[in-house]
């Protein structure tokens, strides 16, 4: 039976649960469940603290896991990142009081508060900066006001929490992070069930990137229309009963959909339909 770790709470948990359910796995969980068995797919889902998931996976206790890239790297666990999952995106940054002009290059001798001791220590070592890392379990943005730190290092999404604390990011982000699918080093494709899970998740991720575009167009404009919607290999084209017209169907990037609509409309296309794709394999 395949054993997969999922985050037990927070935004990562919501996104991971939605992803595995869309991939066809039965993972209906109450708030207190630590283990959910999907008998039909021969999978067990374990709901764990996101910070611990990489450790369980690296030790071979679990086969795969979904966690944050920042958490996996900070754990120093020996895992491979198999897929970026395109949710839970954030930046791991240093932050300082707005009224100062501190940058990471000036951190020598200062105190840096963070919940990610290893990430910060590794970054300071790369910069050859000797600073004290103050490890806190959470709410690091208040550490400066409380007098236990001169700067902080934390995950930043909207930046609102830092702003409320009178802080602002400084320097380039240490890391761009998001939810990732991980496996133990060298065991990315160990077993048919693991390969199937990875393929299903890839299908969902691809489906989220694409839409299906369908429309009718005069045949004399087909060449230009095919440039607008080239599809994966080429668009599907079928004749209509109306003389000189054809129906076109093609996959297109979701992020380009409004420009595609504009260009097709300007070309005289009719009956343009955009349909979401649940999953696909290319």
Image (cartoon, helix red, strand yellow):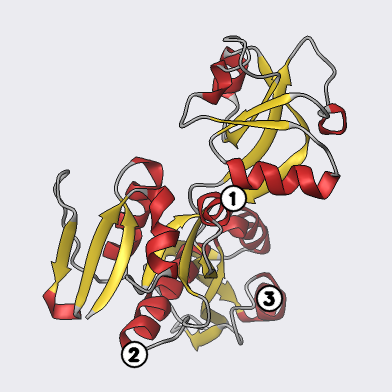
Residue 281 shows in the view: yes
Mark 1: give few (<14), some (14-19) or many (20+) Cα within 10 Å: many
Q: Position of residue 96 (x, y in %)?
A: 72, 21
State which quarter of the image contains the N terminus.
bottom left
Question: Nearer the observer, disc 1 or disc 3?
Answer: 1
Question: Nearer the observer, disc 3 or disc 2?
Answer: 2
Q: Position of residue 10 (x, y in %)?
A: 36, 40
Q: Observer-nearest residue: 248 or 104?
A: 104
Residue at the bottom extreme of this rendering: 192
Task: Please name the residue that numbered disc 3 is placed on.
Answer: 221
Task: Give the mark nearer the N terminus: 3 vs 2.
Answer: 2
Residue 277 shows in the view: no
Task: Please name the residue that numbered disc 2 is placed on.
Answer: 192
Q: Is residue 202 above or below residue 257?
A: below
Q: Observer-nearest residue: 65 or 145?
A: 145
Task: Please name the residue that numbered disc 1 is placed on.
Answer: 177
Mark 3: give few (<14), some (14-19) or many (20+) Cα within 10 Å: some
């Amino acid at each position: 039976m395949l054993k997969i770790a999922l985050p037990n709470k927070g935004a990562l948990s919501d996104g991971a649960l939605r992803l595995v359910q869309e991939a066809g796995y039965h993972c209906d969980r109450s708030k207190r469940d630590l283990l959910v068995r999907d008998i039909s797919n021969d999978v067990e889902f374990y709901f764990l603290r996101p910070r611990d998931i990489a450790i369980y996976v690296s030790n071979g206790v679990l086969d795969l896991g979904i966690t944050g890239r920042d958490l996996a790297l900070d754990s120093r666990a020996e895992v491979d990142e198999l897929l970026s999952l395109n949710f839970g995106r954030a930046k791991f940054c240093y932050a300082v009081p707005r009224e100062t002009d501190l940058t990471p290059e000036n951190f020598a001798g200062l105190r840096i508060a963070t919940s990610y001791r290893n990430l910060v220590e590794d970054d300071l070592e790369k910069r050859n900066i000797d600073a004290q890392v103050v490890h806190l379990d959470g709410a690091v943005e208040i550490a400066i006001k409380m007098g236990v730190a001169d700067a902080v290092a934390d995950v930043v999404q909207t930046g609102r929490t830092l702003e409320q604390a009178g802080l602002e990011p400084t320097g380039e982000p240490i890391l761009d992070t998001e939810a990732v699918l991980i496996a133990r080093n060298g065991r990315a494709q160990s077993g048919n069930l693991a390969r199937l899970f990875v393929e299903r998740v890839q299908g969902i991720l691809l489906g989220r990137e694409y839409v299906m575009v369908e429309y009718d167009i005069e045949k004399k404009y087909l060449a230009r229309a095919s440039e607008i919607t080239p599809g994966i290999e080429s668009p599907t084209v079928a004749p209509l009963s109306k003389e000189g017209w054809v129906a076109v169907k093609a996959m297109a990037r979701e992020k380009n959909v409004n420009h595609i609509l504009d260009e097709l409309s300007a070309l005289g296309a009719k009956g343009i339909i955009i349909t979401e794709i649940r999953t696909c394999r290319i």
